[in-house]
Image: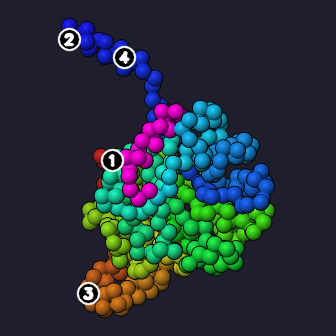
Amino acid sequence: MLKKSILLLLLIFTSLPAQAEWQMDELMIFGGWPWVKGADPDAQAKIYADAGFNILMGERDKLDICQKYGLKLIVTKITPNDVPAIKDHPALWGYWIIDEPLRNFPAVRALKKAYQNADPDHPAYVNLVSRSGEYLSSYMDIVGPELLSYDYYQWWWGMDGHFPKLEIHRDAALKANVPLACWFETNSAFGFPYEDYDKSRPEDNEARLRMSVYTCLAYGVTGIEWFTGRALFEKDGSALNDAGRDVAKINAELKRLGPILMGLKSVDVFHLPPLPSGTRATPEKHWVKILQSGYPNLVMGEFQDKDDVDYLLMANTNWTNDKLAVLQFVEPVLKVEKFDKTSGNWHSLPIGKNGVTKENERLVTRNINHLMYSQSTGGHLIEHFQHLRDNWLSDRTGSQFVEFMLAPGDGDLLRITRDFAPETTRN
């Protein structure tokens, strides 16, 4: 009798329709609230596509327009009962459920399940306000999102929260094995004036946005969400404004980086001191270290692909100055390549054994001296800074070095071919 019952249950479960498991297969470059009132939506969609976007939001009447220009749409103002009419549309990305829910996650889950039952092939999209603690854990446990999206606008709300929020949401996304997406200002002006957004862009807006985007990429973010899309346009919606051109430059790089980043798994993230709250420096015996050259900071995201090849995404958190990035490889490497975000090609970096090159000794010495006499150290620990000088500038065995410059707020992706041969030894 027991065997018959088990067989009956197996027949029941195997006969149920299979629930598709949605996977995000393309780096998300998303324009939120994209449509300028009174402007031609067809012309706007073309401008978005040319500016590197691949996903917009809007009502169902925008599906055909998006398809025309190779865009996907997160559909708004649609009920689960309406889903069957559009669920097979080629331009459909998913369904907009709610923005920044503050409570009642069981209700959000019920709504999400209703959309999933109507269409298991496309995700139900929810965006969170950047709270943490029980708020975030309850959301993940109760709602079970296919994508963790949150907003924290550091240029409007304060920079101190940028990295702590990234740490917390990265951990939650990794634990749930879901992609992580973040919202970014299109215009970094503090106290962003919605009515005069085309006149308020700071001169260093592009560098600020780069700092936001590339530090997030170092944390494994694969969803870049721009708020708001319509703030990228001139008032009549006929062309991009200066902020729009800033975003388009960054998007062009994201389009080239995307296919690589989507194949990587985020392993860890490290910072140079002074450490932002909640972050970590590279461990003492880690296989690769960032060499200290004083403030400004660097972020290093560590990744691996399906073949266990190592990648590093380095980001300059200073949006006003270039930054010399020097990596010290404690364990042997055969090749270090840097991805060219303009051409889409990989280029090998020279690997040295004697610290930084002669051309950068002056820069390094200046940075170390600045660090020694800065308020952050109080001018003490002279021995420590002598050790820093030795680490940067003197001959030594047992390590390899690469160095490259990062533009203000910019980031670069490296691919590392490590030498695991048992006969390999250091000189």
Name the N-terminal-most of marks 3 and 4.
Answer: 4
Residue 119 in picture, x, y percent from top left: 53, 34
Question: Which is more foreground, mark 3 or mark 4?
Answer: 4
Amino acid at dot 1: Asp
**Alpha carbon separation for disc pair 3 and 4:** 71 Å
**Range shown magenta:** 101-121
Question: Circle 4 sits in a helix, a strand or a loop, which is it?
Answer: helix
Q: What residue sits 35% from the left and 77% below the top?
A: 274
Q: Which residue is mark 2?
A: 2
Q: Residues within 10 Å of mark 1 (few under 14, many from 20)?
A: few
- The residue lying toward the viewer, choosing from 94 and 308, is 94
Would you say residue 21 sits in the magenta stretch?
no
CB under 8 Å between discs 4 and 1: no
Q: What residue sits 62% from the left and 76% below the top?
A: 193
Residue 287 in picture, x, y percent from top left: 32, 58
Residue 230 in picture, x, y percent from top left: 67, 63
**Label drawn at residue 141:** 1
The image quadrant that residue 188 belongs to is bottom right
**Alpha carbon separation for disc pair 1 and 2:** 34 Å
CB under 8 Å between discs 1 and 3: no
- Decide if residue 154 is on the left or right side of residue 286: right
Which residue, as the protein is rendered here, is positioned at the far left?
Answer: 2
Name the N-terminal-most of marks 1 and 2.
Answer: 2
Q: Residues within 10 Å of mark 3 (few under 14, many from 20)?
A: few
Q: Quadrant of the N terminus?
A: top left
Amino acid at dot 3: Leu
CB under 8 Å between discs 1 and 2: no
Q: Which residue is mark 4?
A: 12
Name the N-terminal-most of marks 2 and 3.
Answer: 2
Question: Circle 1 sits in a helix, a strand or a loop, which is it?
Answer: helix
